Image (cartoon, rainbow, N blue to C red):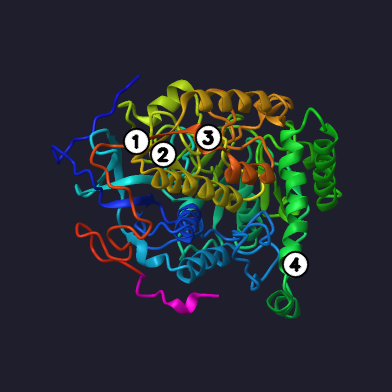
Amino acid sequence: MNMAAVAIHNPRPSVTPDHEVIIIGAGISGIGAAIQLRADGIKDILILERSKDVGGTWRDNRYPGIAVDITSFTYSFSFEQNANWSRVFAPGNELYQYTRQVTSKYGIYPLIRFGVEVASARFDLDSHAWLIDLTDGRRLSARHIVSACGGLISPKMPDIEGLDTFQGNVIHTARWPDDLDLSDKRVAVIGTGATAVQLIPKIARQARQLDVYQRTPIWVLKKPDQTLPGWLKVLFRTVPGLQRSLRGATDTVSETLMVLSAIYYRQAPWLVRMCEKAGINNLREQLPNRQDLWQALTPKYGFGCKRPTFSNDYFRTFARNNVELVTTPIKRITSRGITTQDGRSRRIDTLILATGYKTFEKGNIPSFDVIGSNNINLGDFWHDYRYQAYEGLTIPGYPNFYIMLGPYALIGTSYFKMVEGNAIHLSRCIREANRRGASQVEIRQSVHDAYFRNIQKRQQNTVFLNHNCALSNSYYFDHHGDAPMLRPSTSLEMLWRAKHLPMDHYRFSVLAGHTPSRHDGGRQACEPHPQLPEKGIPAKQTDNNSQ
């Protein structure tokens, strides 16, 4: 196993760290963790964000057609419902604005230092603190750190011969330029996942010719989307509980389609069959006279093996005269186009890569080196010994460390649900450490191992191991053959466990000379750390963003 070393600038770190909690990342998970910690009385918080604003993936992704693929009533914080969504499935820019509004309303902006990137973090046994080295050479320390970097942050480039030789525009959907004009262009899209399903119908209306290169088709259900009328938004704001009730209804539907059908496949295979039939019906209704496309667009793997999506116009796009579905594998990319294995070459001006993101791969989760009390790089450990974490959050050998999107953490319905559950869990750990006067909190190895065995047992019932998923090319799976992206449980179970799991599952240790943290912290969190520049709310941001 490789051991990673981090240079120690200070020969003897102080027992008192710079901050009680440092959160790395100001996307949905970082914001949610900070809100929960502040609500629970933990004030000494610093958030480090390498970009210039909050929002994470909703800040970065700007491709045409971007929208949530779960209803916005479910895809939002339960404690901060938004009455102003324009549609049932909100456009991506509205999610970005939502994250900014929540950050402002709950007073999180003053805690954030923008333009700060973490290179590595090492746990120091002499001080029971994390030493965090930044890419610019500076160092910070924290009693606890929260990795809130998210999973969809590193674009995945396809391994295709000649990609670097293409002389036209090459664009990954995660880095979409605002000024891109595809009018009268010959365009190729590689990839037919959830992003492509949203993108392709939009750009097909602009391009002179659009070639879509499909390796694996995707399950696509009808999208019950519509514009939300003004009178309904007024009711949301004036009738207590109305929007909460609607959220409960959409939660139930989403849990059935996206969670129960996948994790209880052996017990209720009819749920998956029902979803598959709905997907086939959607395909045939959109392309009633194109039986030649039915087989090519119908997945050969089970519903749920990879994330399904919703669209009312994706399939019918392939009936357009300027769109061609290409299922012959790509042989190489040339300076002017793409050559497939049958020898045919198609000339293009613009190449769009809808090839997704790295997920559970070394160097991505976590996106910086994490060296625990065991002196082992967490990325190396997971890569060599399988991805595993207690409740998807904590790992033996890495005390005072919490990873929001850990192995088997994500709930299939909504990222927000995972964030709320993990934020409650980590806040309980920190508060319990303070209550006991402890400087170190670490999940017990035996508890962790029993939990991981239970996860593997539950996986045997899921669609991932039972319904031809090897053909899905899904980012749910890692190089071990495990599916560590999704937690095999319902969101209700996850939230209940976060609130009620015994704190004795953790080992609490006291460092000699340690002074227990006060909930108001030693340094006020709104004050910048002296080593960092003052960067609070960006100039374009004001508290007028609050809802």
In front: label 4 or label 1: 1
Counting residues from the start of the chain, the first of labels 3 and 2 encountered is 2
Q: Element at badge 1?
A: strand
**Residue assigned mark 4:** 226
Q: Is residue 131 left or right of residue 229?
A: left
Q: Which residue is mark 3?
A: 407
Q: Position of residue 394 (x, y in %)?
A: 47, 36
Examine the residues drawn in magenta and state their main secondary structure.
loop
Residue furthest to the top in view is 1
Residue at far left of view: 11
Looking at the image, which is closer to me, 142 or 23?
142
Q: Upstream in the sequence, badge 4 or badge 2?
A: 4
**In the picture provided, is 138 more to the left or to the right than 504?**
left
Q: Amino acid at mark 4?
A: Gln
State which region is magenta: 537-547
Mark 1: which amino acid?
A: Val
Task: Indicate the position of residue 427 as horizontal and vertical percent values.
Answer: 47, 49
x 30%, y 41%: residue? 130
Q: Is residue 426 magenta?
A: no
* Disc 2 and disc 1 in contact, CB within 8 angstroms: yes
Q: Of the two numbered discs 3 and 4 on the same chain, state the one appearing first in sequence.
A: 4
Residue under label 2, please give it.
366
Which corner quadrant of the image does residue 300 belong to?
Answer: top right
Instruction: Please identify the quadrant where the N terminus is shown.
Output: top left
Please tell me how crowded label 1 is: few (under 14), some (14-19), or many (20+) other residues with Cα within 10 Å. many
- Element on which disc 2 rests: loop
Q: Secondary structure at mark 3?
A: loop
* Badge 4 or badge 1: first in the primary sequence: 4
